[in-house]
Image (tube, helix red, strand yellow):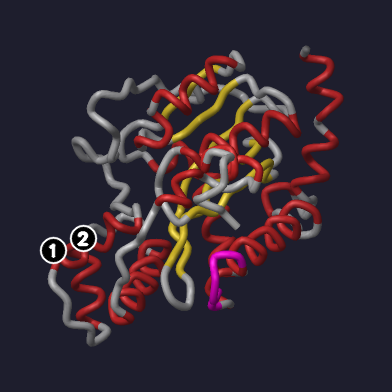
Amino acid sequence: MIDREHRLPIKRQAELLSISRGTVYYHREPLSEADLALMRRLDELHLEHPFAGSRMLRDLLRREGVEVGRQHVATLMRKMGIEAIYRKPNTSRRHPAHPVYPYLLRGLAIERANQVRAMDITYIPMACGFVYLVAVMDWHSRKVLAHRVSITMEADFCVEALQEAVARYGVPEIMNTDQGSQFTGAEFIDELKSNGIAISMDGRGQWRDNVFVERLWKSVKYEEVYLKAYETVSAARAGIAGYIDFYNARRPHRAHLGQTPDGVYSASLPAVSAAA
């Protein structure tokens, strides 16, 4: 789809195709089938035991008959973008030169749509290989406002998802993220500032600060991703998009007494108008 000989710059071609520029340039080193299978199991164990670090995950794998060293587990965890959630120094893989903003949600009553949004990234296994998924969620309704699937962890696909959510649903008061470099870099921060969005970031190692997105990942993986072995990136994009449509419009949400995120989001819009 990208013509490297065309007079139109590759950046512009990527924009017209709605794909990340990093996706065009990136060439992933292939992983062995054994490592891909191990990463899939690590992903499952991380969802079940998010407090487990590389030592505990190694021991859990050994109890299942998988002989693997701690350093190899740690290497795969870095590649997947996962880590233990307990409090410890320097737990977030942020860029040391990037600014970190305070957490603004502690004690805040979140009562309407578009008051607070949250973003996060997760690892998605495929039949051969893997991709990353970023989502923008409305905190009050749990509605997924935008998402992107990418083969890299570059910031481009996060910025694109943020821009889509603003274009389709307007500007929120606050955006909450973790301290990952994708969310602390200039491109992402400038996009928030240009729209007048207050910036909130989780405390280091405090996954509960963004717990609703973590719950979304569990639903996406157990109800969609783990049931299917995507053969291609396009299949992953289509499958995840279909699931998110179902999640928003048809899946009853326990926290909303069986209402859907779409229903709760729409019902709170009068409150948004009244607050404006």
Q: Is residue 199 magenta?
A: no
Quadrant position of the C terminus in the picture: top right
Quadrant position of the N terminus in the picture: bottom right
- The residue at the point 46 percent across, 53 percent down is 122
Q: Magenta segment, which residues?
A: 229-234
Specify the amino acid type for callout 2: Thr
**Secondary structure at numbered mark 2:** helix
- State left or right for residue 172 relative to residue 73: right
Q: Nearer the viewer, residue 26 or 149?
A: 26
Give above or below for 225 relative to 256: below
Q: Are marks 2 and 1 in contact (CB under 8 Å)?
A: yes
- The residue at the point 25 percent across, 40 percent down is 91
Instruction: Specify few, some or many for label 1: CA neighbours under 10 Å numbering under 14, 14-19, or 20 or more.
Output: few
Q: Which mark is residue 75?
A: 2
Residue 73, position as x, y percentages in the image = 21, 66
Residue extending furthest bottom? 65
- State left or right for residue 232 relative to residue 58: right
Specify the amino acid type for callout 1: Gln
Instruction: Specify few, some or many for label 2: CA neighbours under 10 Å numbering under 14, 14-19, or 20 or more.
Output: few
Q: Quadrant of residue 225?
A: bottom right
Residue 81, position as x, y percentages in the image = 34, 52
User: In the rendered image, which residue does mark 1 sit on?
Assistant: 71
Q: Quadrant of residue 110?
A: top right
- State left or right for residue 103 relative to residue 67: right
Give above or below for 157 relative to 199: below
- The residue at the point 75 percent across, 60 percent down is 246
